[in-house]
Image (spheres, rainbow, N blue to C red):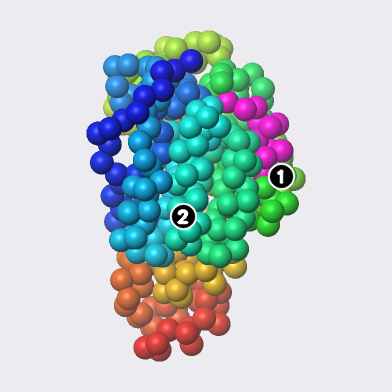
Amino acid sequence: MPVYLIDQHRASVFGTPISHIDDITLARYHAAIYDGCEFGCDYCTGWSKSMRSLTESVRMMPNIAIRAKEELAVMHRDDVIGLTADSDPYQPAEPTYRRTHHVLQMCVEAQHPVVIMTKSPLVLQDIDLIQQLHHDRFAMVIVTIISHNVDVQSRFEHKSPSTVERLALVRELKKYDIPVGVALQPLIPYVNDTDYALKRLLQMIRDAGADFVYWDYLTIVNSRHYQRINESLVWMGNYPPSYLRDLYGTDNVINRAYRQERNQMLLQLCDSFQLPIRLPFSYFAQRFPVARAVAYLLAQHASRDELMGRDVLATQGRDLAQRVLAGDWPLDLLQKHPSYPVFQPLVGQIPSV
Ligand code: SF4
């Protein structure tokens, strides 16, 4: 059990905004309500940040509601806040310390859009706030899941709720008519990304009623992290000592050829299950100004291009999305874009068109 500490020195609740469009979460801010995470998943990049254990202490801000209110008052009202970074907002500390609850209350009061990423059914304790926020503005929950296989899941995530509990959470959240995604991350080569494992898990996610799914690969941040992953793999089974070295070399991400092959497989599976790989446009089109919603859509399309190995198109798509977000509206380029029929009905709402 960790030590719970009040962190008097933390400067900000939400931190600084990112400059690129996050087409998965739509978030401009990625905030960690708690510093430290009691779930302590073996693959978590949080292990790399300190010589101390990720689960040794959990720090939290004093007066977080007041600070959140002050920051929300000067924030752009369309910038989505992601409670998504480096610690689970509904880890075991939450029922006692309620830091996430207090921040959410402030977001509801300010009608500020929020996305929550969690592994925990404790999020249901705040379902009234989330539902209210989605009614007034926009709120989404993303549930992270790594495997259908109990051995794999429990080996890497000793303290987190099981996959069955998380799929039940997806089902439960959908009853409240809010957008729900599933993050399939991290994909660990040959551990949870075999054809069978992916097909089985995607089927379960589809059956649970998720609105979309996305995936990301294991990133190895530094030698401490590398060591930890290696130790987990030893516990897992018969992996050769060169396993990570051969796949990652000196990079922190797995080699491109491997990713491309798995991306193709995942895209095929998602298409066959009619499982979108990003939040569908209809879920957010009316919740943001048209230019912003279109920019998100263009960025989503660019990500699909990238997953298909079409890097040039992906770069062009991201540039176009940034231009639209910045207020430019290059109609000739937009009309040629494959997504144009999707957002064409909204074009009349752009003042300059
Ligand atoms: S729940 Fe998320 S933040 Fe917490 S240890 Fe696991 S991966 Fe890291």
* Residue occupying the point 44% across, 12% down: 231
Q: Nearer the viewer, residue 111 or 353?
A: 111
Residue 159 visible from this viewpoint:
yes
* Residue occupying the point 56% across, 65% down: 136
Q: Secondary structure at mark 1?
A: helix
Label 1 with label 2: CB-CB less than 8 Å: no
Which quarter shows the C terminus?
A: bottom left
Q: Examine the rendered structure and indicate whether residue 245 appears above or below residue 347.
A: above
Q: Amino acid at mark 2?
A: Cys
Residues rendered magenta in the picture: 160-171
Q: Is residue 65 left or right of residue 215?
A: left
Mark 2, ligand 1, within 8 Å: the answer is no
Q: Position of residue 6 (x, y in %)?
A: 35, 28
Asked whether 76 falls inside the magenta stretch, the response is: no
Quick one: label 1, few (<14), some, or many (20+) residues within 10 Å?
A: some
Q: Nearer the viewer, residue 262 or 89?
A: 89
Task: Name the front one of labels 1 and 2.
Answer: 2
Quarter residue 4 falls in: top left
Asked whether 168 falls inside the magenta stretch, the response is: yes
Q: Position of residue 266 (x, y in %)?
A: 58, 44
Q: Position of residue 264 (x, y in %)?
A: 54, 47
Q: Is residue 280 left or right of residue 333?
A: right
Q: Examine the rendered structure and indicate whether residue 331 appears above or below residue 147.
A: below
Q: Amino acid at mark 1?
A: Glu
* Residue occupying the point 52% across, 68% down: 287
Q: Main secondary structure of the magenta part?
A: helix
Q: Which residue is mark 2?
A: 107
Quarter residue 139 falls in: bottom right
Q: Which residue is mark 1?
A: 172
